[in-house]
Amino acid sequence: MKIEIKYESSWRNSFLDGSNDEPLPKTGRKYVASMTSLKNVDNYKPRKVEHNTVMGILNRLIGDQRKLYQSRNSDAYYFKELEPLVSFEDKPSYVNQEMTYIRNISGSTDRESYTGMIQINDPIFTSDYSEQLWGVLTLNVDELCRFILGSEKITKTINHNPLVISAQFDILSKIKALPNEGIVNQAFNYLKSNFENFKGLNNKEEVQTISLYCSALYLQLERLSTTFDVSSAKTKAGCLSGISNNNFTKKNFMGRYTSGKEKKIWGNPYIRKERIKGVGEVTSLMEKAGGTLNINISIDRNASKELYEMIENAGVSSFYLGKKGLAYVSDIRL
């Protein structure tokens, strides 16, 4: 028996982790197609027509709309004895990459955005200690290391405004990692011995500059606490909002100093960019394909007639092949 299926715009990517071949977790399968998730190469998931795809189609054609693993676990699974007799040939006539906007109904929050009115009169910006605290962000790397080691005083100032401070963090985060040697190594070791949460190194064992600035703020807060009451600068957990010992998160920082809530992300373009040595920057988009899928089932004529009648009785006109797109049976031969 041969079943010929025509399909158009079949999506050849997956946006969820886990597998269709196992029960759903209580919280559902995790969405891994956000802009942040796609920075991880493992979350860009290309897909092609496989045996499971074909078996899912055959079950759909006879009216069984359960997940394939549910059908297979059933005592009345129609294809239990027939699966080994099923073969297929996928003949795509085109495979394109297209820019597609994916909706994310989980409502993630944007790390770089905020909502509401900016509150510049918070005590962390208007107190006696504010100038010396935020002045840490004005130091260059050499001055910063000397400040950490206790030989540099804060003389430079920065406008005590959350937008200005956030913009300064954006600039500092772009400074390249530094070799862990000399005065940088001394500053690194000093922070390491004072803050147990301080990591400070990338995967090349280089010192992350932004981590030095973040932990230097906590160091300055400790030093200022001997002279000023700095409790107004801290959250209930005793931290600086949006600032850890290793990094700065704009949404958390601005979330405390604005009147609105965190900004929701309800979707994003499905795109992954990566730089490959010797090739350059490579952009991967949503892959869509159209063509013909030929399914062959090596059964005798009587069994073919029975299966044909089941397909006719179910009357399935169109269906998805894989993810989205349009597929339909164009021909059945016994």
Image (cartoon, helix red, strand yellow):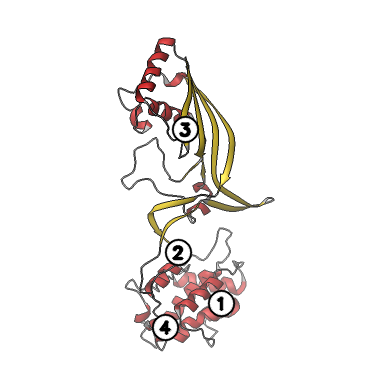
Point out the tag, 3 or 2, that comes first from the N-terminus.
2
Depth check, front residue: 127 or 4: 4
> Dividing the picture into quarters, in which one does residue 122 lie?
bottom left
- State the residue position of label 4: 125
Q: CA distance from mark 3 to mark 2?
A: 39 Å
Q: CA distance from mark 4 to mark 1?
A: 24 Å
Marks 2 and 1, the one that precedes in the sequence:
2
Under mark 3, the amino acid is: Ala
Query: Tag 3, which secondary structure?
Result: strand
* Gap between marks 4 and 3 measured at Cα: 61 Å
Residue matched to label 1: 145
Q: Nearer the viewer, mark 4 or mark 1?
A: 4
Q: State the residue position of label 2.
A: 111
Q: Amino acid at mark 4?
A: Phe
Coordinates of residue 287 in the picture (x, y in percent): 54, 43
Whole-angstrom CA distance, mark 1 to mark 3, is 63 Å
Q: Amino acid at mark 2?
A: Arg
Element type at marker 1? Answer: helix
The residue depicted at 43 percent of the width and 29 percent of the height is 57
Position of residue 166 relative to residue 269, above or below, is below
**Of the two numbered discs 2 and 1 in the rendering, the one whose residue sits closer to the viewer:** 2
Mark 1 in CB contact with mark 3 (< 8 angstroms): no
- From where the camera sits, is residue 47 visible? no
